[in-house]
Image (cartoon, helix red, strand yellow):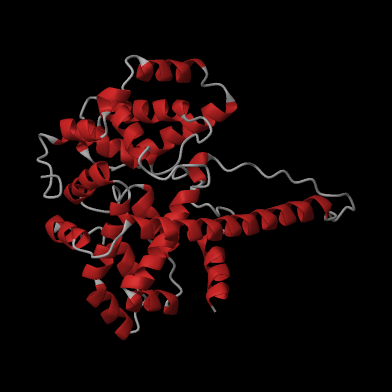
Amino acid sequence: MIRKGIPHQYRPQMWKDLLQYSQYYTPGEFESLLRHAQEHRDEPRLGQALRDVEMDLDRTFPGHPAFASPAGQAALRSVLTALVVLRPEIGYCQGMSFLAATLLLVYPGQPEDAFWTMRLLTARLPAQFYSANMFDVHVEVHVLEDLIQQRLGAIRRLMRANKVEGLHFAVQWYVCLFANAMPMETVFRIWDLVVSEGDKILHRVAIALLKLNRAELLDRAEKKEFILPTLLQISARCYNCETLIKTALGLLNFKRSTIYTLRAAASETVARELNTVAQRRTARRGASVTSPTPGGAQATAATPASSPASAGSAFADDGPAVVSQQRAGVEG
């Protein structure tokens, strides 16, 4: 029944059962986290995270009636606030608001249920998916590129020819579990499978989406058109969730052991890229401190830390383009 889609009226309880909600739920913890936020909101790090949450409220499904009212925004705020307090080492990451909002559509008026379901759902993702530098999101994008190479070689060649990397379109798919990229009914169907089968389904869906749009991408290339706009659009118009899910589940030899092997190699690559970016940042800071000013004195520039909400890329200062250039050099 799950692979065919959970009827929406049963989805709230089915997701709880699949995530073993009753085993982990602790009465009063949600309220305790909210009290902590209220009592310690003047602390710099927590205060910044809470301001980041506030900034994202209006950006999350803007215009959706569920979040247009003060009550809807209050529910979304409370879920995100509790998560920020729960994970102070992370703070707030952009993308979390779309996860929370999607869960509030399943658990309307029940922010505590949305909080606990989100907590258990994200626990099924790689450990550093929502870390400050979103390390594992970038690992998964590398894995996707390898899967595209193996299964859709023509599309991977098009990407290289257009200087398009997975970072340019797949980060938004993965960090929000497609919540801000696809029609909501399609998102619910994907999440049914994430809840029941784990994160591997994200790669199945991404490959299926590209496979279903392969002809259009090749046609764009034949006409000498840039393919990135199409890559950014194909998810938003994916209304036929039945075809998408059937294609995703019909992919053969999609073994978890293969994903683990690709992840191990991708983790090393991302770690090297992060190290390169860190060295460049250090070099730039050193240059700004030691370079003389026109008056002869040394400049003493302070570099503010990026807020969690702005850490949409693990390579925030240099951006995906620089990392893409590094990788293009490796690939030749």
Q: Pick whichever, 305 or 84, lies toward us.
A: 84
| Image quadrant containing the N terminus | top left
Q: Position of residue 121 (x, y in %)?
A: 32, 37
Furthest residue toward front: 257
Q: How many marks?
A: 0
Q: Pick whichever, 219 or 141, lies toward us.
A: 141
The residue located at (17%, 34%) in the rendering is: 14
- Please say if 279 is above or below 225: above
Which of the 4 image quadrants contains residue 247?
Answer: bottom left
Q: Is residue 112 visible?
A: no
- Please say if 182 is above or below 154: above
Q: Is residue 241 visible?
A: yes
Which of the 4 image quadrants contains residue 67?
Answer: top left
| Image quadrant containing the C terminus | bottom right
The residue located at (85%, 56%) in the rendering is: 294
Does 241 sit left or right of 111 as displayed? left
Q: Pick whichever, 310 or 24, lies toward us.
A: 24
Q: Position of residue 291 (x, y in %)?
A: 82, 56
Does 322 sit left or right of 1 as displayed? right
Q: Position of residue 48 (x, y in %)?
A: 53, 32
The residue located at (49%, 42%) in the rendering is: 131
Furthest residue toward right: 296
Does 202 sit left or right of 165 as displayed? left
The residue located at (28%, 75%) in the rendering is: 217
Q: Position of residue 165 (x, y in %)?
A: 44, 67
